[in-house]
Image (spheres, coloured by chain):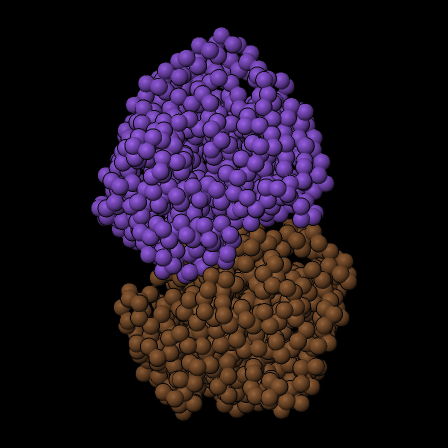
Chain colours: A purple, B brown
Amino acid sequence: MAEQIYRVNMTNLTTSTEPVPDKWMGLGGRGLTSTIVADEVVPTCHPLGSKNKLVVAPGLLSGTVAANSGRLSVGAKSPLTGTIKEANAGGTAAQMLAKLGCKALIIEGLPKNDIWYTLQISKDGVTIQEEKELIGKGNFAVVAGIGKRTSAKHGVMTIGPAGEMKMLSANISIKDPDSHLRSSGRGGLGAVMGSKKVKCIIIEPTDAKVEIVDQEKFKEANRTFTKALVDNPISQALGTYGTNVLVNIINESGALPTKNFTGGQFDGHEEISGETMHDIIVEREGKPRHNCHKGCVIQCSQIYNDKDKKYKTSGFEYESIWAMGADCCVDNLDHIAEADHLMDDIGIDSIETSVAMGVAMEGGLLAFGDGEGICRILREDVGKGTPLGRIIGCGAGSVGRAFGVTRVPVVKNQAIPAYDPRAIKGMGITYATSTQGADHTMGYTIATNILGVGGSVDPLSQEGQVELSRNLQIATAAIDSTGMCLFIAFAALDDATCLPALVDMINARFGADLTAEDVTNLGISILKTERAFNEAAGFTSKDDRLPEFFYEEPIAPHNVVWDIPDEELDKFWNF
Amino acid sequence: MAEQIYRVNMTNLTTSTEPVPDKWMGLGGRGLTSTIVADEVVPTCHPLGSKNKLVVAPGLLSGTVAANSGRLSVGAKSPLTGTIKEANAGGTAAQMLAKLGCKALIIEGLPKNDIWYTLQISKDGVTIQEEKELIGKGNFAVVAGIGKRTSAKHGVMTIGPAGEMKMLSANISIKDPDSHLRSSGRGGLGAVMGSKKVKCIIIEPTDAKVEIVDQEKFKEANRTFTKALVDNPISQALGTYGTNVLVNIINESGALPTKNFTGGQFDGHEEISGETMHDIIVEREGKPRHNCHKGCVIQCSQIYNDKDKKYKTSGFEYESIWAMGADCCVDNLDHIAEADHLMDDIGIDSIETSVAMGVAMEGGLLAFGDGEGICRILREDVGKGTPLGRIIGCGAGSVGRAFGVTRVPVVKNQAIPAYDPRAIKGMGITYATSTQGADHTMGYTIATNILGVGGSVDPLSQEGQVELSRNLQIATAAIDSTGMCLFIAFAALDDATCLPALVDMINARFGADLTAEDVTNLGISILKTERAFNEAAGFTSKDDRLPEFFYEEPIAPHNVVWDIPDEELDKFWNF
């Protein structure tokens, strides 16, 4: 099916399908969302105003049988950071949109009235329907409600109460193959969707297939690619323990931010580790392995049941567990799972919200370690939009401002995730320089700083960190454009057959003749497009800095501060 | 008495007096606070962290008998705007500090513990004392408490609960000659004082006099200067009706922002006008004329009593009355007076807080016009620091973010005051380009746009506004350095004898030989110093913009939008 751009104007409630302009033709995923945002959004606009646009794009390989290619990119100007933003997630939407021939969905304008809408996407385009039944509902109820209204096979993208209330860390949830949720979590894209009064996007299933120019070459390349993924030891560890395998590893490295980033190791790390989680899941008859999208061969997701062996949460990630766990000093995995479930239902970024809780704890709102208190505040305040809930729902920076806390771990107002930049300096470079605020997924130097993948760079040294982060940020921007899960990077860095096979698949899909260098250049081009948007929005190198306290407070056990000179940081963009 | 710099280090609780460095010698007031902040504060620092400094400086003529010379400047990096900040006010402190020989007081560092302090200033320097009794108290109780502890003649600078809680629009209150309060209101300087755990600054009275090199010349010049002030018709109107004379004038001009800046005229303008206020004051046996500092010959302050003829508030200014009145649609002057009293007691900027209430009303928190509701929220939420109180106490931008309101009238996160920039375009230039966020006092084009002082520039035209604002911003920076009240500007613009007399007084005081051009150059130099600080903090021309809605929504009755091109705005700094 010929690819098209689906466009929805919420001001006059019209929709259209448009041919893909030549300039967007070779792009997908993040490359496409960032390019469209840069092309069409006024950089200085209010992120929740009429001039922002929400852009959804499957990756270049989404909808094909390529392993791990089912990630969806969502982009806009972020209301949390003020920068350009792309957040990607699994679920069924990317593959379904690609099969419908939807190269990208662009939602623009704001309704003039106070009515909510649902968008329904089919091969014929988009229809806009008034939505009443699902307004105010949590994400799980929305997915169930749409399942009843349509079918279990329909795709769903939705916002919860947080997005309806335009909380600055509201996410967009995407239905996975088991009708659970995956999240485009970071940067408040759910608030952008909420500002446009779109409660959910329903995607019709189809039997259509995406066109592959050279089927044989594609299959052959996919075999090689899949083998590289499956054989990789980190892929295997991720399959067994999930991303939460990292709790013990990062704790051991002394970089597990604890008690609102006052220490690098957490006494309760065993209680919340991937190993412990695995045993609990097995004991409660959950699923230690689970895929967030069809075709994933790593299967780092899992299904975590409660004590009564009933479903509690899935996609129970290291970063969320770290944030509610070590950062808030909660050593009870069931409290963290309950919080994770609540955040999924409310539709709010679990990293931002948990780090915000840690800041609030330092501000005296709650005692460190009070997991039940966290769940109560999520349920009664954040979910209901009380003033306290709105302070927390607007993120860690918001909590710092409201409660006069100066130790606020954010860059560009987005919460720093699960790796302390003082003890893993490559991550500090990524947090500081990323076009999207602090985000580990933008240039995951843990691979090389800690896991010894793609070489080895001492995490405590100043040497080589800028180059490491730069290379990874470029590669990541390219991978995020393919629809591939970022976890292919471990195999790509370690197995010489992996990356060429990925390039071969892209070439076979489009009848193209790209080289590995072209892919790198794509990554470079995306970063520069994003950076230019941010500069036009008013960002400068002064925004590429970590908070003051990282420069001043040594973190145990290494007793190190953030010591990469600002001039060194500014060299990041010399490419 | 030889002037000295008084320095207090709150980290190690030490104090010192230092000779005035040559580079600071010819400076006073805002010129001195901004220069010291630029010299000693890291521009990118956290405003509530250890690297910010609070600087207090009387003007060049403060402490002399020069008419209207009793204004005090307070400066720091602002926690509200992130820019450099100077807020000045009357009261007795400027004159007392000058007589003690205190050229400037610099408070730096943060205490290591959780103890509050009082600073006591005498001719021998500063002493630091632990403070318990006054913690948690409102400003009126603080002034009364210090009066009992010392004498009614002691000077007081204090923060209320808002400053203690580090709310981003907390102000610093200064005792006036009648033990009422004046406020260094804007930009959250009270939060900076609170971050340093200084509850109040007590100034010992003295019989010392400031040195005047040429007494005769000084007296002669002051006579001319005073006559120019007293004869000026705007001075006289200010004396009769206070600054609130402006409600009817600005309403008539169609630039009285109403209902969170959705209209330019307020149906209830008569009920809150200066004329009505004057009649109420007379009827209730208040004082229509009152001076905020000794030696003021304009006397725009007043004492407003309640229905029982008891003191309610003083320094009841147009901007506060507009903000609680027209902007929140409250047409009951007693409700506004009660709110003003509460804000004075809590220690929070009345412009920022009232505009924040208007945004909250648009967000659905309260009905427009509900003056009693405003007072209840001030008393029960802002004063007590509930989550709602903290959202409001952190200003209009904070309310917008928390409640998802996009029509938020702020520049650099500081609330736009009482003159709609669409209908008085010169004010828009000042709001956009000021080094301090939206602030009418930085370049009060009302003089020329509306009052016909210093020429006439059509408020609705694009022509001449940049030059008008620039000239006034330069002149204002100079006036703010003299200790003079800004209201001398009307006489200075209209009476050819006024400005030379002011320059003569400065020359007579210091034995100097300045010309009017030197004074202009001082203003230019101050603006450039402030701008350089902001640029080093990361501000760009992208921050010199009005909010989106001013470009899009025409305001009645003129049905005009903000239409000064951005390139035109950027020409402001071409000098």
Q: Decide if residue B369 is in sight here.
A: yes
In this rendering, the answer to whether B94 lies above or below A418 is below
Residue that lies at the very extreme toward the left in this rendered image = A557
**Quadrant location, the C terminus of chain B:** bottom right
Q: Nearer the viewer, residue A31 or B226?
A: A31
Q: Residue at x 50, y 62 (%)?
A: B388
Q: Residue at x 28, y 65 (%)?
A: B112
In this rendering, the answer to whether A359 lies above or below B66 is above
**Quadrant location, the N terminus of chain B:** bottom left
For residue B41, which quarter of the picture?
Answer: bottom left
Q: Nearer the viewer, residue A246 or B250?
A: A246
Q: Image check: B290 left or right of A494?
A: right
For residue A40, which quarter of the picture?
Answer: top right
Point out residue A64 in the picture as x, y percentages from the top left corner: 51, 18
Q: Decide if residue A478 is in sight here.
A: no
Q: Residue at x 60, y 72 (%)?
A: B372
Q: Residue at x 53, y 15 (%)?
A: A509
Point out residue A83 in the picture as x, y percentages from the top left corner: 51, 43
In this rendering, the answer to whether A96 lies above or below A200 is above
